[in-house]
Image: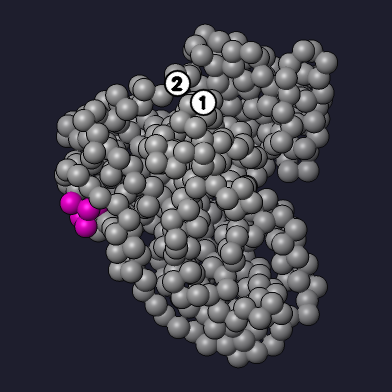
Amino acid sequence: MNPSIFRAYSIRGIAGDSLTVQDMALIGGAIGTLLGEANMPDVVVGRDYRLSSPLLAAALREGLLATGMEVIDIGSCPTPLLNFATDHYRAGAGLMVTASHNPPNHNGLKIRTDHTVQGPELQRIYRTAVSGPLRQGCGRLHCAQPTAAYLEAIRTRVKIARSLKVVVDAGNGAAGPIVLPLLEMLGCDAIPLYCDPDGRFPNRVPDPAAPGALSALSTRVIAEGADAGLAYDGDGDRLVMVDERGGRILGDRLLALLAREALATRRGARIVYELSCTQAVPETVSSMGGEPISCPVGYAFVHETMRKAGAIMGGEAAGHLFFDDPGFGFDDAMLATAKMLSLLSRSEQPLSSMLDALPRYCSSPEHRLQCPDDLKRAVVAAVREQFSGQGYKLESTDGVKAHFGDGWGLFRASNTQPAVTLHCEARSAARVADIEHIMLSAARQALTRAGVPPT
């Protein structure tokens, strides 16, 4: 078993190569063994629509059943439904076969108990899978369909003041079969775009935050005269939107809008945001009397920080949004969709004007530079060293975030791929370009010294 598939907070690999059905069966056996030792005999299993997901999910179930687990299979679904079902059925854990926004030939596993399993816990699963001993038993398989209960739980938490016209780009991922019925229940006029699941992702990349990914959605929103566009990733747990003018809205600005509304009635509450979020988030939270709390990049870290801080909401630029609503303790793009549409339906302003009221910043696209996993930390450390002693304020919570007075640049190791990433923000596009040039030069020098040809 390739140890590199055990990443920061999920398992990710190339299906049939670094991640095989034999690997997944062993992983299922290891998880079943550890859950059994913890007296947690019930587990919910779901999968996305990637072509490799049915076989990998079957292998996972076999591994779990061989350890005596009670396996509740909910079939193909978005990750938020898996999270809801885990609580709904009072299971000890939820397992989602997915590679989220990774390319079509990738797959993996997200694991949740009362938190997102990450780091040392994933390494314990790896050691158990490789070295054993695995628990022996004869489990039982149950099939369940929690969709109706899930949709009703969301519907009861929001109120739509007026009917909205929205274009829905599910990217041929797992969100389509869930979000369209939800929008119908909410009384919205939904225009589908790429809503039929297709594990090849033939129409766009499964990452809605990728540059250019939402060009078709923007065009369609304008052509239809829609109030907004909704876009989701491969497993349907991330939301990115488009305003009525076709402008892209990443998760951090959605978080700022939702936090502003929530803090109007919950003054003093805590809001968690990750380091790559726009500065508009902490500024908005502070201006409304809330307490902004930053954390490392990655949805698992947002969730962990929220739990520890008792925060009411959290999110990241990529589109993972969390709420403290009972029964929805994990990131949920469907609940985020309902809350955003509720907010928009009660506003006399279009979505673009609501965004204009937020503090204005310009940002760069995310630069993703290929770098072997075993060199990522050293490359980041080398960049940090280059900026040390030069008068910059540096944050080292996750990689290195260099503050330039009127902007910042964040250089860090990717949690999900063999790559390092760079993202910059400033008050003006010209200043973003300056910071981008400085940070990219440092990154490429560090990569070259490490023997990695910069991309």
Q: Would you say residue 334 is visible in this rendering?
A: yes
From the viewer's perspective, tell me whether residue 432 is left or right of residue 170: right
Q: Residues within 10 Å of mark 2 (few under 14, many from 20)?
A: some
Q: Main secondary structure of the magenta part?
A: helix
Residue 359's disc is 2
Say what secondary structure mark 1 lies in: helix
- From which residue to which does the magenta span run? 183-187
Image x and y of residue 419, in percent:
66, 38
Give the residue at mark 1. 283
In the rendered view, tell whether residue 148 sits above or below residue 428. Answer: below
Q: Would you say residue 173 is visible in this rendering?
A: no
Quarter of the image where one finds residue 196:
bottom left
Q: Residues within 10 Å of mark 1 (few under 14, many from 20)?
A: some
Which image quarter is the N terminus in? bottom right
Q: Amino acid at mark 2?
A: Pro
Which image quarter is the C terminus in? top right
The residue lying at 52 percent from left, 63 percent from top is 97
The residue lying at 50 percent from left, 56 percent from top is 330
The residue lying at 61 percent from left, 33 percent from top is 275
Image x and y of residue 442, in percent:
73, 19
Disc 2 and disc 1 in contact, CB within 8 angstroms: yes
